Amino acid sequence: MASSLSPSPSSLDQTLRDVDDYVLENGSEGLSRDTLHYVYELVKNGNVAFRENRMEEAINFYSRANNIKSGDPIILSNRSAAYIRISQYFMHRTPSSSERRPLSGLEPTTLAELGLKDAEKLVELQSNSAKSYLLKANAFLLENSPTLGLYLLDGELLSEGQLEKYEKARDVILSGLQVDPFSNSLRASLQNLESVSSSSRGMSTHGHPERNDDFDCTLCLKLLYEPVTTPCGHSFCCSCLFQSMDRGNKCPLCRTVLFISPRTCSISVTLKNIIQKNFPEEYAERKQEHDSLIKAGVDLLPLFVMDVVIPCQRFPLNIFEPRYRLMVRRIMEGNHRMGMAILDSTGSLAEFACEVEITECEPLPDGRFYIEIESRRRFRIIHSWDQDGYRVAEVEWIQDIMPPEGTSERDTLQQQTYNAVEDARSWIARAKEAARHDCCNTKLLEYHTDQRKLERLASVEVMMPSPKDPERFSFWLATLSNRRPAERLDLLRIRDTAERIRRGLIFLRQEEQGCRIQ
Protein backbone atom coordinates (compact mmCIF):
# COMPACT_ATOMS: atom_id res chain seq x y z
CA MET A 1 0.00 0.00 0.00
CA ALA A 2 1.26 3.50 -0.77
CA SER A 3 2.35 5.72 2.10
CA SER A 4 2.27 9.51 2.41
CA LEU A 5 5.76 10.20 1.19
CA SER A 6 6.50 13.82 1.98
CA PRO A 7 4.93 16.97 3.37
CA SER A 8 2.69 19.04 1.18
CA PRO A 9 4.53 21.57 -1.02
CA SER A 10 5.49 24.42 1.23
CA SER A 11 7.93 27.23 1.69
CA LEU A 12 10.26 24.68 3.22
CA ASP A 13 10.95 23.46 -0.31
CA GLN A 14 11.87 26.92 -1.63
CA THR A 15 15.44 26.60 -0.34
CA LEU A 16 15.95 23.43 -2.42
CA ARG A 17 15.22 25.05 -5.76
CA ASP A 18 18.74 26.32 -6.29
CA VAL A 19 22.24 26.09 -4.90
CA ASP A 20 24.94 28.64 -4.12
CA ASP A 21 27.78 29.45 -6.50
CA TYR A 22 31.32 29.04 -5.25
CA VAL A 23 33.48 32.16 -4.96
CA LEU A 24 37.25 31.75 -5.42
CA GLU A 25 38.01 34.74 -3.21
CA ASN A 26 36.80 32.72 -0.23
CA GLY A 27 40.06 30.81 -0.23
CA SER A 28 41.32 28.60 2.52
CA GLU A 29 44.72 28.69 4.11
CA GLY A 30 46.90 25.72 3.24
CA LEU A 31 45.44 25.19 -0.25
CA SER A 32 47.20 26.35 -3.40
CA ARG A 33 45.55 28.53 -6.01
CA ASP A 34 45.43 25.57 -8.44
CA THR A 35 43.77 23.37 -5.83
CA LEU A 36 41.19 26.03 -5.04
CA HIS A 37 40.50 26.46 -8.75
CA TYR A 38 39.98 22.70 -9.06
CA VAL A 39 37.51 22.81 -6.13
CA TYR A 40 35.77 25.73 -7.85
CA GLU A 41 35.39 23.68 -11.06
CA LEU A 42 34.01 20.69 -9.13
CA VAL A 43 31.40 22.82 -7.37
CA LYS A 44 30.56 24.58 -10.65
CA ASN A 45 29.99 21.23 -12.39
CA GLY A 46 27.96 20.06 -9.43
CA ASN A 47 25.77 23.16 -9.64
CA VAL A 48 25.19 22.59 -13.36
CA ALA A 49 24.16 18.99 -12.66
CA PHE A 50 21.88 20.14 -9.82
CA ARG A 51 20.09 22.71 -12.00
CA GLU A 52 19.59 20.03 -14.68
CA ASN A 53 18.14 17.64 -12.06
CA ARG A 54 21.07 15.21 -12.33
CA MET A 55 21.32 14.88 -8.57
CA GLU A 56 23.53 11.78 -8.40
CA GLU A 57 26.16 13.52 -10.55
CA ALA A 58 25.83 16.67 -8.45
CA ILE A 59 26.41 14.72 -5.23
CA ASN A 60 29.47 13.09 -6.78
CA PHE A 61 30.99 16.47 -7.71
CA TYR A 62 30.23 17.98 -4.29
CA SER A 63 31.68 14.95 -2.47
CA ARG A 64 34.90 15.16 -4.49
CA ALA A 65 35.15 18.84 -3.63
CA ASN A 66 34.46 18.10 0.03
CA ASN A 67 37.26 15.51 0.10
CA ILE A 68 39.70 18.28 -0.85
CA LYS A 69 38.18 21.15 1.11
CA SER A 70 36.18 19.57 3.91
CA GLY A 71 33.89 21.66 6.05
CA ASP A 72 33.29 24.32 3.43
CA PRO A 73 29.80 25.82 4.07
CA ILE A 74 28.88 26.20 0.38
CA ILE A 75 29.88 22.62 -0.46
CA LEU A 76 27.99 21.23 2.54
CA SER A 77 24.93 23.38 1.78
CA ASN A 78 24.80 22.34 -1.87
CA ARG A 79 25.37 18.64 -1.16
CA SER A 80 22.72 18.65 1.57
CA ALA A 81 20.23 20.20 -0.88
CA ALA A 82 21.09 17.55 -3.49
CA TYR A 83 20.65 14.69 -1.00
CA ILE A 84 17.26 16.05 0.04
CA ARG A 85 16.11 16.65 -3.55
CA ILE A 86 16.99 13.11 -4.68
CA SER A 87 15.36 11.65 -1.57
CA GLN A 88 12.16 13.58 -2.36
CA TYR A 89 12.31 12.38 -5.97
CA PHE A 90 12.54 8.72 -5.02
CA MET A 91 9.75 9.06 -2.45
CA HIS A 92 7.43 10.69 -5.00
CA ARG A 93 8.00 8.18 -7.80
CA THR A 94 4.95 6.56 -9.34
CA PRO A 95 4.79 2.75 -9.77
CA SER A 96 5.29 3.14 -13.55
CA SER A 97 8.42 5.24 -13.00
CA SER A 98 9.73 2.60 -10.58
CA GLU A 99 9.41 -0.06 -13.28
CA ARG A 100 11.29 2.02 -15.85
CA ARG A 101 14.06 2.94 -13.41
CA PRO A 102 14.25 0.55 -10.43
CA LEU A 103 15.83 1.87 -7.25
CA SER A 104 19.26 0.23 -7.03
CA GLY A 105 21.26 2.75 -5.01
CA LEU A 106 20.81 4.12 -1.51
CA GLU A 107 17.34 4.12 0.04
CA PRO A 108 15.48 7.47 0.17
CA THR A 109 15.64 7.53 3.98
CA THR A 110 19.40 6.95 3.90
CA LEU A 111 19.83 9.82 1.44
CA ALA A 112 17.78 12.03 3.76
CA GLU A 113 19.99 11.03 6.70
CA LEU A 114 23.09 12.04 4.72
CA GLY A 115 21.44 15.37 3.90
CA LEU A 116 20.66 15.85 7.59
CA LYS A 117 24.29 15.23 8.58
CA ASP A 118 25.51 17.88 6.14
CA ALA A 119 22.82 20.31 7.34
CA GLU A 120 23.77 19.78 10.99
CA LYS A 121 27.43 20.52 10.19
CA LEU A 122 26.30 23.60 8.30
CA VAL A 123 24.32 24.86 11.31
CA GLU A 124 27.46 24.51 13.44
CA LEU A 125 29.53 26.42 10.87
CA GLN A 126 26.95 29.08 9.96
CA SER A 127 24.54 29.40 12.86
CA ASN A 128 23.43 32.79 11.52
CA SER A 129 22.33 31.45 8.11
CA ALA A 130 18.59 30.90 7.59
CA LYS A 131 19.28 28.43 4.80
CA SER A 132 21.13 26.03 7.10
CA TYR A 133 18.05 25.76 9.36
CA LEU A 134 15.73 25.29 6.39
CA LEU A 135 17.91 22.47 5.04
CA LYS A 136 17.96 20.78 8.43
CA ALA A 137 14.17 21.05 8.76
CA ASN A 138 13.65 19.58 5.28
CA ALA A 139 15.94 16.67 6.07
CA PHE A 140 14.09 15.97 9.33
CA LEU A 141 10.80 15.62 7.47
CA LEU A 142 12.29 13.06 5.07
CA GLU A 143 14.55 11.13 7.46
CA ASN A 144 11.94 8.41 8.15
CA SER A 145 9.49 7.74 5.37
CA PRO A 146 5.96 8.01 6.78
CA THR A 147 3.66 5.07 7.29
CA LEU A 148 -0.02 4.68 8.04
CA GLY A 149 -1.33 6.48 11.06
CA LEU A 150 -4.23 8.01 12.91
CA TYR A 151 -4.14 11.47 11.39
CA LEU A 152 -5.30 12.83 8.04
CA LEU A 153 -3.48 15.39 5.92
CA ASP A 154 -4.74 16.50 2.48
CA GLY A 155 -6.80 13.29 2.28
CA GLU A 156 -3.84 11.06 3.17
CA LEU A 157 -3.04 9.29 6.41
CA LEU A 158 -0.23 10.74 8.51
CA SER A 159 1.53 8.75 11.24
CA GLU A 160 2.31 9.76 14.80
CA GLY A 161 5.98 9.29 13.92
CA GLN A 162 5.64 11.75 11.05
CA LEU A 163 3.95 14.26 13.37
CA GLU A 164 7.01 13.99 15.60
CA LYS A 165 9.13 14.86 12.56
CA TYR A 166 6.99 17.94 11.97
CA GLU A 167 7.54 18.96 15.59
CA LYS A 168 11.32 18.49 15.26
CA ALA A 169 11.35 20.49 12.02
CA ARG A 170 9.31 23.21 13.76
CA ASP A 171 11.86 23.34 16.61
CA VAL A 172 14.68 23.76 14.07
CA ILE A 173 12.87 26.67 12.41
CA LEU A 174 12.26 28.29 15.83
CA SER A 175 16.00 28.00 16.56
CA GLY A 176 16.71 29.77 13.29
CA LEU A 177 14.27 32.55 14.11
CA GLN A 178 16.07 33.16 17.39
CA VAL A 179 19.18 33.93 15.34
CA ASP A 180 17.42 35.77 12.50
CA PRO A 181 13.95 36.87 13.69
CA PHE A 182 13.29 38.90 10.52
CA SER A 183 13.86 36.06 8.02
CA ASN A 184 10.79 35.85 5.77
CA SER A 185 11.61 32.29 4.65
CA LEU A 186 11.86 31.03 8.24
CA ARG A 187 8.63 32.80 9.22
CA ALA A 188 6.74 31.33 6.24
CA SER A 189 8.11 27.85 7.03
CA LEU A 190 7.04 28.09 10.66
CA GLN A 191 3.53 29.13 9.65
CA ASN A 192 3.25 26.18 7.28
CA LEU A 193 4.50 23.64 9.81
CA GLU A 194 2.24 24.91 12.57
CA SER A 195 -0.83 24.72 10.32
CA VAL A 196 0.00 21.12 9.34
CA SER A 197 0.65 20.01 12.92
CA SER A 198 -2.41 21.70 14.43
CA SER A 199 -4.80 20.46 11.73
CA SER A 200 -3.53 16.90 12.08
CA ARG A 201 -3.76 16.93 15.86
CA GLY A 202 -7.21 18.46 15.70
CA MET A 203 -8.42 15.63 13.51
CA SER A 204 -6.98 12.98 15.85
CA THR A 205 -9.81 13.60 18.29
CA HIS A 206 -12.48 12.50 15.82
CA GLY A 207 -12.21 8.84 16.81
CA HIS A 208 -10.65 5.69 15.42
CA PRO A 209 -9.98 5.36 11.69
CA GLU A 210 -12.55 3.46 9.72
CA ARG A 211 -11.68 -0.17 8.97
CA ASN A 212 -11.03 -0.34 5.26
CA ASP A 213 -8.62 -2.03 2.87
CA ASP A 214 -5.98 0.66 3.52
CA PHE A 215 -5.02 -1.48 6.51
CA ASP A 216 -4.87 -4.73 4.51
CA CYS A 217 -1.83 -6.49 3.08
CA THR A 218 -2.18 -6.52 -0.71
CA LEU A 219 -0.64 -10.01 -0.84
CA CYS A 220 -2.78 -11.98 1.63
CA LEU A 221 -5.72 -9.49 1.56
CA LYS A 222 -5.95 -9.63 5.35
CA LEU A 223 -5.22 -7.14 8.12
CA LEU A 224 -1.52 -6.27 8.17
CA TYR A 225 0.38 -8.39 10.69
CA GLU A 226 3.94 -7.46 11.70
CA PRO A 227 3.93 -4.83 8.91
CA VAL A 228 7.06 -3.89 7.00
CA THR A 229 7.29 -0.74 4.87
CA THR A 230 9.63 -0.98 1.90
CA PRO A 231 11.97 1.84 0.77
CA CYS A 232 9.55 2.46 -2.12
CA GLY A 233 6.78 3.18 0.40
CA HIS A 234 4.56 0.06 0.31
CA SER A 235 3.53 -1.93 3.38
CA PHE A 236 3.03 -5.69 3.63
CA CYS A 237 2.92 -8.39 6.28
CA CYS A 238 6.56 -9.27 6.97
CA SER A 239 6.01 -12.96 6.19
CA CYS A 240 4.04 -12.16 3.00
CA LEU A 241 6.73 -9.80 1.68
CA PHE A 242 9.61 -12.22 2.10
CA GLN A 243 7.57 -15.14 0.80
CA SER A 244 7.03 -13.05 -2.33
CA MET A 245 10.73 -12.10 -2.47
CA ASP A 246 11.67 -15.79 -2.52
CA ARG A 247 10.78 -15.58 -6.21
CA GLY A 248 12.45 -12.24 -6.95
CA ASN A 249 13.86 -9.23 -5.11
CA LYS A 250 11.30 -6.71 -6.33
CA CYS A 251 8.44 -4.91 -4.62
CA PRO A 252 5.25 -6.90 -5.36
CA LEU A 253 3.39 -3.68 -6.25
CA CYS A 254 5.70 -1.30 -8.10
CA ARG A 255 8.51 -3.77 -9.00
CA THR A 256 11.23 -1.57 -7.50
CA VAL A 257 14.36 -3.63 -6.82
CA LEU A 258 14.62 -4.20 -3.05
CA PHE A 259 17.88 -4.77 -1.20
CA ILE A 260 16.38 -5.94 2.08
CA SER A 261 16.35 -9.21 4.02
CA PRO A 262 14.53 -10.50 7.13
CA ARG A 263 17.67 -9.82 9.14
CA THR A 264 18.06 -6.18 8.09
CA CYS A 265 14.41 -5.17 7.68
CA SER A 266 12.62 -4.04 10.82
CA ILE A 267 8.94 -4.03 11.65
CA SER A 268 7.14 -0.68 11.17
CA VAL A 269 6.54 -0.09 14.87
CA THR A 270 4.27 2.95 14.47
CA LEU A 271 2.03 1.22 11.95
CA LYS A 272 1.89 -1.96 14.03
CA ASN A 273 0.92 -0.04 17.17
CA ILE A 274 -1.80 1.87 15.34
CA ILE A 275 -3.35 -1.29 13.89
CA GLN A 276 -3.06 -3.19 17.17
CA LYS A 277 -4.65 -0.30 19.09
CA ASN A 278 -7.57 0.27 16.74
CA PHE A 279 -8.36 -3.28 15.63
CA PRO A 280 -7.32 -5.42 18.64
CA GLU A 281 -9.64 -8.39 18.07
CA GLU A 282 -8.80 -8.80 14.38
CA TYR A 283 -5.09 -8.36 15.10
CA ALA A 284 -5.27 -11.04 17.80
CA GLU A 285 -6.84 -13.41 15.26
CA ARG A 286 -4.02 -12.68 12.80
CA LYS A 287 -1.46 -13.36 15.53
CA GLN A 288 -3.10 -16.68 16.38
CA GLU A 289 -3.11 -17.61 12.69
CA HIS A 290 0.59 -16.72 12.38
CA ASP A 291 1.55 -18.60 15.56
CA SER A 292 -0.15 -21.74 14.29
CA LEU A 293 2.27 -21.73 11.34
CA ILE A 294 5.45 -21.29 13.37
CA LYS A 295 4.47 -23.36 16.42
CA ALA A 296 3.25 -26.57 14.88
CA GLY A 297 2.77 -28.45 18.17
CA VAL A 298 4.53 -31.20 20.12
CA ASP A 299 3.79 -33.96 17.60
CA LEU A 300 3.79 -31.91 14.39
CA LEU A 301 6.92 -31.23 12.35
CA PRO A 302 7.65 -29.46 9.05
CA LEU A 303 9.65 -31.81 6.82
CA PHE A 304 12.73 -31.17 4.71
CA VAL A 305 12.62 -34.01 2.19
CA MET A 306 16.18 -34.74 1.09
CA ASP A 307 18.03 -37.64 2.75
CA VAL A 308 18.06 -40.05 5.68
CA VAL A 309 19.59 -38.59 8.83
CA ILE A 310 20.27 -40.50 12.04
CA PRO A 311 20.77 -38.96 15.51
CA CYS A 312 24.17 -37.47 16.45
CA GLN A 313 25.00 -36.02 13.04
CA ARG A 314 26.01 -32.45 12.24
CA PHE A 315 26.33 -30.90 8.79
CA PRO A 316 25.58 -27.73 6.76
CA LEU A 317 22.77 -27.19 4.26
CA ASN A 318 22.18 -24.61 1.54
CA ILE A 319 18.47 -23.74 1.40
CA PHE A 320 17.57 -22.29 -1.99
CA GLU A 321 14.08 -23.54 -2.94
CA PRO A 322 11.38 -20.90 -2.25
CA ARG A 323 9.15 -23.35 -0.34
CA TYR A 324 11.99 -24.31 2.01
CA ARG A 325 13.11 -20.69 2.46
CA LEU A 326 9.60 -19.99 3.76
CA MET A 327 9.77 -23.07 5.98
CA VAL A 328 13.14 -22.07 7.45
CA ARG A 329 11.93 -18.54 8.23
CA ARG A 330 8.95 -19.96 10.11
CA ILE A 331 11.11 -22.50 11.93
CA MET A 332 13.53 -19.77 13.05
CA GLU A 333 10.59 -17.86 14.55
CA GLY A 334 9.58 -21.03 16.42
CA ASN A 335 11.62 -23.79 18.05
CA HIS A 336 14.31 -24.09 15.31
CA ARG A 337 13.39 -27.74 14.67
CA MET A 338 12.22 -29.72 11.64
CA GLY A 339 12.21 -33.29 10.40
CA MET A 340 14.49 -34.68 7.69
CA ALA A 341 12.99 -37.42 5.60
CA ILE A 342 13.52 -39.27 2.33
CA LEU A 343 11.29 -40.68 -0.38
CA ASP A 344 11.20 -44.49 -0.61
CA SER A 345 11.40 -46.55 -3.80
CA THR A 346 7.69 -45.96 -4.50
CA GLY A 347 8.04 -42.17 -4.33
CA SER A 348 6.26 -41.89 -0.98
CA LEU A 349 7.70 -40.55 2.27
CA ALA A 350 9.68 -43.20 4.16
CA GLU A 351 7.94 -44.19 7.40
CA PHE A 352 10.89 -43.34 9.66
CA ALA A 353 12.79 -40.06 9.83
CA CYS A 354 14.78 -37.88 12.25
CA GLU A 355 14.27 -34.53 13.94
CA VAL A 356 17.03 -31.94 13.45
CA GLU A 357 17.72 -28.59 15.13
CA ILE A 358 19.00 -25.56 13.22
CA THR A 359 21.97 -24.39 15.31
CA GLU A 360 23.23 -21.72 12.88
CA CYS A 361 21.26 -19.78 10.27
CA GLU A 362 22.87 -17.23 7.95
CA PRO A 363 20.55 -15.41 5.51
CA LEU A 364 22.38 -14.69 2.24
CA PRO A 365 21.90 -11.55 0.11
CA ASP A 366 20.14 -13.47 -2.68
CA GLY A 367 17.50 -14.87 -0.30
CA ARG A 368 19.09 -18.27 0.31
CA PHE A 369 19.90 -19.57 3.78
CA TYR A 370 23.10 -21.24 4.89
CA ILE A 371 22.20 -23.36 7.90
CA GLU A 372 23.95 -25.85 10.17
CA ILE A 373 21.90 -28.63 11.72
CA GLU A 374 22.31 -31.26 14.41
CA SER A 375 20.14 -34.38 14.39
CA ARG A 376 18.29 -35.08 17.64
CA ARG A 377 15.72 -37.91 17.81
CA ARG A 378 13.89 -40.24 15.46
CA PHE A 379 10.21 -40.55 14.76
CA ARG A 380 7.65 -42.44 12.71
CA ILE A 381 5.40 -40.50 10.34
CA ILE A 382 1.74 -41.18 11.07
CA HIS A 383 0.42 -39.02 8.24
CA SER A 384 1.52 -35.91 6.33
CA TRP A 385 0.08 -33.10 4.21
CA ASP A 386 1.12 -30.10 2.12
CA GLN A 387 1.28 -26.64 3.69
CA ASP A 388 2.33 -23.69 1.51
CA GLY A 389 4.40 -25.99 -0.71
CA TYR A 390 6.28 -28.02 1.91
CA ARG A 391 5.30 -31.11 3.90
CA VAL A 392 4.09 -31.18 7.49
CA ALA A 393 3.71 -34.45 9.40
CA GLU A 394 2.07 -35.75 12.53
CA VAL A 395 4.73 -37.93 14.15
CA GLU A 396 5.21 -40.58 16.81
CA TRP A 397 8.49 -40.40 18.72
CA ILE A 398 10.43 -43.68 18.73
CA GLN A 399 12.78 -45.05 21.40
CA ASP A 400 14.61 -48.35 21.81
CA ILE A 401 13.18 -51.08 24.00
CA MET A 402 15.68 -51.02 26.84
CA PRO A 403 16.21 -53.72 29.51
CA PRO A 404 15.05 -52.51 32.97
CA GLU A 405 17.59 -50.86 35.25
CA GLY A 406 19.36 -53.28 37.62
CA THR A 407 18.88 -56.37 35.45
CA SER A 408 21.70 -58.48 34.07
CA GLU A 409 20.56 -57.66 30.52
CA ARG A 410 21.01 -53.95 31.25
CA ASP A 411 24.46 -54.54 32.76
CA THR A 412 25.45 -56.58 29.71
CA LEU A 413 24.28 -53.80 27.38
CA GLN A 414 26.21 -51.20 29.36
CA GLN A 415 29.37 -53.28 29.24
CA GLN A 416 28.91 -53.78 25.49
CA THR A 417 28.66 -49.99 25.17
CA TYR A 418 31.88 -49.36 27.12
CA ASN A 419 33.72 -51.92 24.98
CA ALA A 420 32.39 -50.27 21.82
CA VAL A 421 33.64 -46.89 23.10
CA GLU A 422 37.19 -48.26 23.30
CA ASP A 423 36.89 -49.85 19.85
CA ALA A 424 35.59 -46.58 18.37
CA ARG A 425 38.39 -44.49 19.91
CA SER A 426 41.01 -46.93 18.61
CA TRP A 427 39.41 -46.85 15.16
CA ILE A 428 39.41 -43.03 15.11
CA ALA A 429 43.07 -42.92 16.18
CA ARG A 430 44.06 -45.33 13.39
CA ALA A 431 41.99 -43.43 10.83
CA LYS A 432 43.60 -40.12 11.83
CA GLU A 433 47.08 -41.60 11.62
CA ALA A 434 46.36 -43.04 8.17
CA ALA A 435 45.03 -39.67 6.95
CA ARG A 436 48.08 -37.82 8.31
CA HIS A 437 50.39 -40.33 6.64
CA ASP A 438 48.57 -39.88 3.34
CA CYS A 439 48.83 -36.08 3.68
CA CYS A 440 52.61 -36.36 3.76
CA ASN A 441 52.88 -38.70 0.79
CA THR A 442 50.29 -37.52 -1.73
CA LYS A 443 49.87 -34.86 -4.38
CA LEU A 444 48.10 -31.55 -3.76
CA LEU A 445 44.56 -32.67 -4.73
CA GLU A 446 44.80 -35.85 -2.69
CA TYR A 447 46.33 -33.83 0.17
CA HIS A 448 43.20 -31.67 0.41
CA THR A 449 41.04 -34.81 0.34
CA ASP A 450 42.96 -36.29 3.27
CA GLN A 451 42.76 -32.97 5.14
CA ARG A 452 38.98 -33.10 4.79
CA LYS A 453 39.02 -36.65 6.19
CA LEU A 454 40.88 -35.39 9.26
CA GLU A 455 38.41 -32.53 9.70
CA ARG A 456 35.45 -34.90 9.38
CA LEU A 457 36.90 -37.32 11.95
CA ALA A 458 37.46 -34.45 14.39
CA SER A 459 33.90 -33.14 13.97
CA VAL A 460 32.38 -36.61 14.44
CA GLU A 461 34.54 -37.31 17.48
CA VAL A 462 33.28 -34.12 19.15
CA MET A 463 29.68 -35.35 18.76
CA MET A 464 30.27 -38.58 20.75
CA PRO A 465 27.60 -38.86 23.49
CA SER A 466 28.13 -40.29 26.95
CA PRO A 467 28.35 -44.12 27.04
CA LYS A 468 25.77 -43.96 29.83
CA ASP A 469 23.23 -43.38 27.05
CA PRO A 470 23.65 -46.57 24.99
CA GLU A 471 20.89 -45.71 22.49
CA ARG A 472 22.40 -42.37 21.40
CA PHE A 473 25.88 -43.85 21.43
CA SER A 474 24.76 -46.65 19.09
CA PHE A 475 23.62 -44.05 16.53
CA TRP A 476 26.83 -42.04 16.90
CA LEU A 477 28.85 -45.21 16.30
CA ALA A 478 27.09 -45.64 12.96
CA THR A 479 27.96 -42.06 11.91
CA LEU A 480 31.70 -42.93 11.89
CA SER A 481 31.28 -44.81 8.63
CA ASN A 482 29.67 -43.62 5.42
CA ARG A 483 26.48 -45.66 4.99
CA ARG A 484 23.97 -45.79 2.17
CA PRO A 485 20.51 -44.24 2.75
CA ALA A 486 18.87 -47.68 2.92
CA GLU A 487 21.30 -48.75 5.65
CA ARG A 488 20.68 -45.60 7.67
CA LEU A 489 16.93 -46.10 7.30
CA ASP A 490 17.30 -49.63 8.73
CA LEU A 491 19.14 -48.18 11.73
CA LEU A 492 16.19 -45.86 12.39
CA ARG A 493 13.77 -48.81 12.31
CA ILE A 494 15.77 -50.98 14.73
CA ARG A 495 14.66 -50.71 18.36
CA ASP A 496 17.36 -53.03 19.72
CA THR A 497 20.34 -51.01 20.99
CA ALA A 498 22.67 -54.02 21.20
CA GLU A 499 21.96 -54.96 17.59
CA ARG A 500 22.67 -51.39 16.43
CA ILE A 501 26.01 -51.37 18.32
CA ARG A 502 26.89 -54.72 16.74
CA ARG A 503 26.15 -53.36 13.27
CA GLY A 504 28.09 -50.19 13.98
CA LEU A 505 31.23 -52.16 14.88
CA ILE A 506 30.87 -54.28 11.74
CA PHE A 507 30.55 -51.10 9.70
CA LEU A 508 33.83 -49.83 11.19
CA ARG A 509 35.70 -53.01 10.33
CA GLN A 510 34.35 -52.97 6.80
CA GLU A 511 35.20 -49.26 6.46
CA GLU A 512 38.76 -49.93 7.60
CA GLN A 513 39.08 -52.68 5.04
CA GLY A 514 37.83 -50.32 2.34
CA CYS A 515 34.49 -51.99 1.61
CA ARG A 516 30.88 -52.03 2.80
CA ILE A 517 28.42 -54.60 4.06
CA GLN A 518 25.95 -55.47 1.34
Image: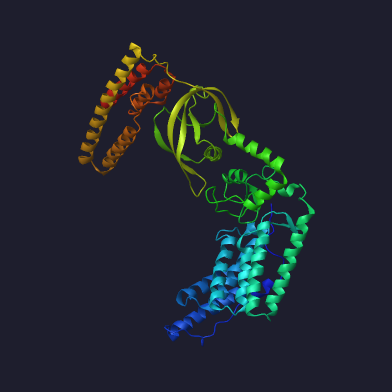
- Scheme by which the image is coloured: rainbow
Quadrant holding the C terminus: top left
Q: Residue furthest bottom?
A: 25
Residue 431 in sight from this viewpoint? yes
Q: Position of residue 312 (x, y in %)?
A: 39, 30
In the depicted structure, whether residue 111 falls above or below residue 341 = below
Q: How many marks?
A: 0
Compared with 436, 477 (above or below) is above
Spot occupied by residue 472 in the image (x, y as percentages of width and height): 38, 25
Is 329 in front, or is 323? Answer: 329
Residue 222 seen by the camera: no
407 or 41, nearer to the observer: 407
Q: Position of residue 58 (x, y in %)?
A: 56, 72
Quadrant of residue 237 within the rendered picture = top right
At horizontal 47% and vertical 78% (from top left) the residue drawn is: 69
What residue do we see at 48% from left, 43% from top?
Answer: 369
Q: In the figure, 49 relative to 241: above or below?
A: below
Q: Residue furthest top?
A: 408
Horizontal side of residue 70 vs 184, given as left or right: left
Left or right: residue 158 versus residue 59 is right
Q: Residue at x 62, y 38 (%)?
A: 290
Q: Position of residue 349 (x, y in %)?
A: 52, 25
Left or right of residue 167, residue 110 in this image: left
